[in-house]
Image: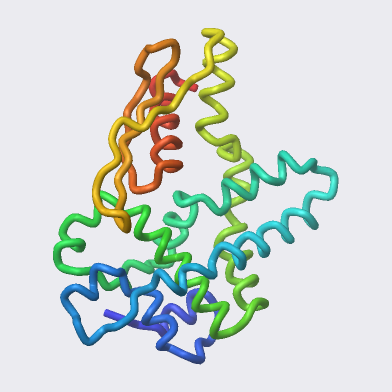
Amino acid sequence: MENFEALEKKINLKFKNLDLYKNAFIHRSYLNEHKNVKEHNERIEFLWDAVLELAVTDFLYKKFPKFNEWKLTNFRSSLVKKETLAQTARGLWLWDFLKLSKGENETWWRNKDYILANTFEAFLGAIYLDLWYKSAEKFVIENVVTKLDNIVEQQTFIDSKTKIQWYVQSVFKFTPKYETITESWFDHDKHYVIWIYSAWCLMWVWEWKSKQMAQQMAAKKACDLLWV
């Protein structure tokens, strides 16, 4: 049940245009069963990239004046990646507001992190449109950037593809390769099956809606397998 007042208190912001936030929580599947609803959250989600990256980039640049571009870029990538955004969405209980079709609701656990991350992105877009950049920046710093200490401690700013490449090259003297095995579904709902291999030795296979994310998840599972 929607309780925007509780959400306002949680993030310490006062919403002006509730319609923006309601729209941010409408998944495209919801329109199939509710013909009176004309718009889903993908258009408003379009804004998140510029807002989130600018807020995070500005914070990191000022906080770490001695760090080089490579390290700052890796910190930023870890903060804005889908897993981090999905984790933040869970912490804010954003799924309580999410509107899905019945079919998607029954099977959404398959793509839960992907949907939650996209919902967070649309929600940030709504904050930007409703309250402008400074409020969106405040929200990002208080809810996303706060995860930086944990990222640095666990060295998760080094992504899985980089980790597995370093390890395989140093131990086995090969470079891991990624190959798309199948590409299925419709243009608006692609699924990719990616395998990662080294010297024709299969390391892991993973399926995801995003080709890049499928590669990252295959690399992560390969890291777990090799205790990297």
161 horizontally vs 51: left or right: left
The image's colour scheme reads: rainbow
- Residue at 37 percent of width and 60 percent of height: 116
The extreme right residue here reads 66
The residue at 22%/87% (across/down) is 36
Residue 5 point in image, percent of width and height: 42, 85
**Quarter that holds the N terminus:** bottom left
Residue 97 falls in image quadrant? bottom left
- Residue 220 location, x and y as percent? 43, 32
Image spot of residue 155 (x, y percent): 60, 35
* Image vertical order of residue 227 relative to residue 67, above or below: above
Which residue is at the far top? 172
Point 84% across, 44% down: residue: 66
Return the residue found at the far front: 187
Q: Position of residue 214 (x, y in %)?
A: 39, 39
Q: In this view, does 37 lie to the left or right of 163?
A: left
User: Left or right: 185 with respect to 163?
Assistant: left
Asked if residue 162 is positioned above or below residue 60 in the image, the reply reads above
Residue drawn at x 28%, y 35% as measured from the top left = 182
Q: How many marks?
A: 0
Q: Above or below — where is 205 with respect to 184?
A: above
Tell which of 184 and 68 is nearer to you. 184
